[in-house]
Image (spheres, rainbow, N blue to C red):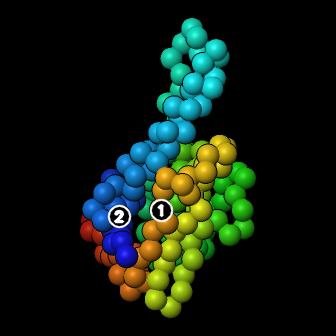
Amino acid sequence: MQEIEFRLGDGEHWILIDGVPFLDLVREAELPYERYEQLERAEEFASERPPQLAGQYSYFMERWTGWPTRHYLGEPVAVAYNQEDDETMLLGCNCGTAECWALLARIDVTDTEVRWSRFRNNHRDWDLSLTLGPFAFSRRQYEQALHATAYQGLQFRR
């Protein structure tokens, strides 16, 4: 099982999995799809640099995801375009409107485990399940990490 950490700071919420920023894991997983898309659309970009798409997300503001919200327990506080009922937005767009370019996943919660799987971007048909996750966390450790955000938020607001 993996270990998760949620951090608050400067109004943002950071996620680390086994000590690695989740955004870094996502960027690495999306990079092959970005490169393929750039090659496939090379003629479109002949006169300009192709867009950088891999990992173009940001973490959410703490008001969405800091404890006591249950967003990361599969009870979303916000919904992205093209999001299925059983999905949760894990990362949002780096433009400031989280819902416009989102990383979605399924969050399954059992008595002993929290599992993130079926990762996808809400605008691309990239099958990120081949390159990202699934991640399985001890429910106890996961909930402790979420509860710690309440304390971090109090420290940050002082």
Q: In which quarter of the image is the C terminus?
A: bottom left
Q: In which quarter of the image is residue 136?
A: bottom left
> Viewer-proximal residue, 158 or 143?
143
| Label 2 residue SS | strand
Q: Which residue is located at x 66 percent, y 54 percent?
A: 80
Of badges 1 and 2, nearer the viewer stands: 1
Inspect the image, locate mark 1, and give the three-letter code of the amino acid beneath it. Gly
Q: Position of residue 34 (x, y in %)?
A: 53, 35
Disc number at residue 48? none
| Label 1 residue SS | loop
Inspect the image, locate mark 2, and give the three-letter code of the amino acid beneath it. Ile
User: Callout 2 environment at 10 Å: few (<14), some (14 to 19), or many (20+)?
Assistant: some
Are the residues tagged 1 and 2 within 8 Å (C-beta)?
no
Q: Which residue is located at x 69 percent, y 58 percent?
A: 83
Image position of 109 with respect to 11: above or below:
below
User: Callout 1 environment at 10 Å: few (<14), some (14 to 19), or many (20+)?
Assistant: some
Q: Which residue is located at x 40 percent, y 82 percent?
A: 138
Cα separation, mark 1 vs mark 2, equals 11 Å
Residue 124 visible in the displayed image: yes
Q: Mark 1 points at which residue?
A: 133
Q: In which quarter of the image is residue 153?
A: bottom left
Numbered label tally: 2
Q: If you read the primary sequence from the N terminus, does the residue marked by circle 1 or circle 2 appear first?
A: 2
Q: Position of residue 84 (x, y in %)?
A: 72, 62
Disc number at residue 17? 2
> Viewer-proximal residue, 156 or 34?
34
Image position of 69 with respect to 7: above or below:
below
Q: Where is residue 6 in the image (x, y as percent from the top left)?
A: 36, 67
